Amino acid sequence: MTEALRVTREGGTAVLEMAEPHSRNALSDAMRAAFAETVAALAADADLRAVILTGSEGVFCAGGDLKKMLANHKAGAVGGAEDILPRMAHLHGWLRQLRDLPVPVICAVDGPAYGAGLGLALTGDIILASTRASFNASFCKVGAVPDGNLFWSLPRMVGLQRARELFYTGRTLDAEEAQRIGIAMEVLPPENLLPRAREMAAMMADASPTAFALTKAISARSLELDSEALLAMEAQAQSVCLTSRYHKEALERFTQKQPPRFDFR
C-alpha cells in the first residue's frame, strides 16, 4: 500500500484504488511509481486470482499530470525527445504488465477516465462504469498523440473509424454511449459499482488458473493472427487443460451432479 495507490486483499482478489482525488487521480510521479511496484508484485503472486482497479471519491483517473508537465517545461527539464522517452518506457512497462496479468482484471470506472486514464481503464478484461462515469481521449487538446496503449486497445473495442473520431475530436462520452459502442460492459449506480466488480471477481476466481491464463493470452492475439495460427495455439492449450487436475475434478463433479466450482451468471 502507498499513499497514491491503496491495495487491499480480499481472498485471491486484489483491489487497487487510486487515492489522489485532489488531483483527479492524475498519473503523478508517485502514482506511476506505486503502479510499477504494485503490478510487479502482483505478477509474481501465485495466489492472485483477480484484480479490481478503481478510483476514489467519484474519480477514476484524469490521465497525465498536466501541471507537473507545465512545471517541467518552465524549469527547462524537457529539452528534447530523449527527456520523454524514459518516462514513456516506464509507463509502458507497468501498463503492459497490468494488461497481461494471467488473471481477470476488472476496471470499475466511477467518474472521469480521461487521456492516459482511458488507456488505464482499457487494460481491463471487463470494464464496468457507474452512471456518472465519462471517457475522453483528450490528447489532441494539448497537442499530443494518444498514449496508454490506446492505439492498440481503443480500435479493438470500438473499431478504427470510431477510435479515430474520438482521437481527432477529444470529445467526452458519457456512460450510456460508452456502453453502446463497446467500451463499458455494464453501467450501474455508483453505489453498486464495486459490489458488482467484487461479485464478478469472486465468481471468476474459482476458475482454473491455467485455463484462464491461456484463454486470456490466446484471445489477446485473436485479431492479429490468422485462423490456422489460432487453431495451433488452441490445440496446444487444450492439451494442457484437458490433462489438468482441475479438468479431471470438474468431470467428477459433473458426473456426480455436483455444482461446478466456476459458475458465472
Image (cartoon, rainbow, N blue to C red):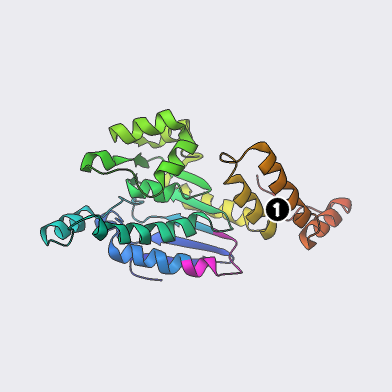
Percent across and percent down for residue 194 are 48, 52
Q: Give the magenta part as a residue range.
A: 40-50
In depth, the one of 177 and 37 nearer the eye is 37
In depth, the one of 123 and 227 nearer the eye is 227
Query: Quick check: is 49 in the magenta stretch?
Result: yes
Mark 1 residue element: loop
Percent across and percent down for residue 30 are 30, 66
For label 1, count other residues whose C-alpha is less than 10 Å away and answer few (under 14), some (14-19) or many (20+).
some
Amino acid under disc 1: Phe
Residue 243 seen: yes
The residue that appears at 35% across and 47% down in the rendered structure is 147
Q: How many tags in the picture? A: 1
Q: Label 1: which residue?
A: 262
Residue 110 seen: no
Residue 207 higher or lower than 192, as above or below: below
The residue that appears at 41% across and 28% down in the rendered structure is 161
The residue that appears at 86% across and 56% down in the rendered structure is 252
Q: Quadrant of the C terminus?
A: top right
Taking 250 as reference, is 175 left or right?
Answer: left
The residue that appears at 69% across and 48% down in the rendered structure is 233
- In this view, which residue lies farthest toward the right? 255
Q: Quadrant of residue 251?
A: bottom right
- In this view, which residue lies farthest toward the left? 74
Percent across and percent down for residue 201 are 58, 55
Taking 49 as reference, is 210 left or right?
Answer: right
Residue 59 higher or lower than 20, as above or below: above
